[in-house]
Amino acid sequence: MTSILKVDNLQDASGTGTPYIKDAVLQVKQGILRTNWSGDDSQAWQNTPLSVTITPQSTSSNILITAMISYSLGDGSHGGFKVVRNDTDFLLTTETLGNRIASHIHSHMSSTYDTDYQIQNATINLLDSPSSTSSLVYKLQARTASASTYRIYLNHLGFRTEDQNYQAYCISTITAMEIGG
């Protein structure tokens, strides 16, 4: 015998909201950066315009953060990216750093070919357990390392000339998914 369940609306037992389902995706929010961004040479973490806000339904929920980042660096530059929650680091290395930088992504572009013609793509996948029902803001931060001449860019090449068909503009995204815990 086959059964079919058809409903127009699901509510929790009290009838006041949607049911909370363990291990299910409960909500999805996304931030999209459609413009270009250029970091400065401060050698410190800088907020980029790419962020997403989500308010978990339960303190037992996890938040899956995914990001697709289109970036480039100036010729010979080192740079990195990390995601912060409410301006606080999370899920970074526990290794002793010394002069090293703790980041979710680190890159070096060493040749003119890299900086003139290639926008790099990187992904981030982080499963956060914030134990909160307050609004959470996940932001992408960027920084360069070592030299004051290093540059970091989102959605465009470090080297741009006037309207060349071999150069491109891209987008970057960050997505937050609440997973019932």
Image: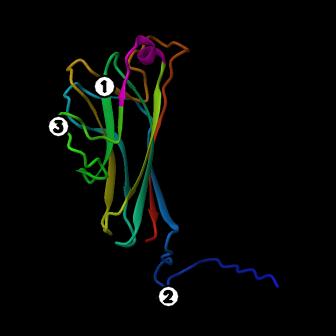
Which residue in the rendered view is the most extreme toward the front? 96
Marks 3 and 1 close (CB-CB < 8 Å): no
Q: Residue at x 46, y 28 (%)?
A: 120
Q: Residue at x 37, y 64 (%)?
A: 55
- Image quadrant in which the C terminus is located: bottom left
Which quarter of the rendered picture does the N terminus lie within? bottom right
Instruction: Kindly identify which residue carries mark 3.
Output: 98
Q: Residues within 10 Å of mark 2 (few under 14, many from 20)?
A: few
Q: Residue furthest left?
A: 98
Q: Residues within 10 Å of mark 3 (few under 14, many from 20)?
A: few
Residue to which mark 2 is pinned: 13
- Residue 55 vs residue 166: left or right? left
Mark 2 falls on what kind of element? Answer: loop
Q: Which residues are magenta?
A: 107-117
- Label 3 SS: loop
Q: CA distance from mark 1 to mark 2?
A: 54 Å
Please name which of the two marks, 3 or 2, marks the residue nearer to the observer.
3
User: Could you classify mark 1 by the number of other residues whose Cα lies within 10 Å: few (under 14), some (14-19), or many (20 or more)?
Assistant: many
C-alpha gap between disc 3 and disc 2: 53 Å
Q: Is residue 20 above or below residue 52?
A: below
Question: Label 1: which residue?
Answer: 78
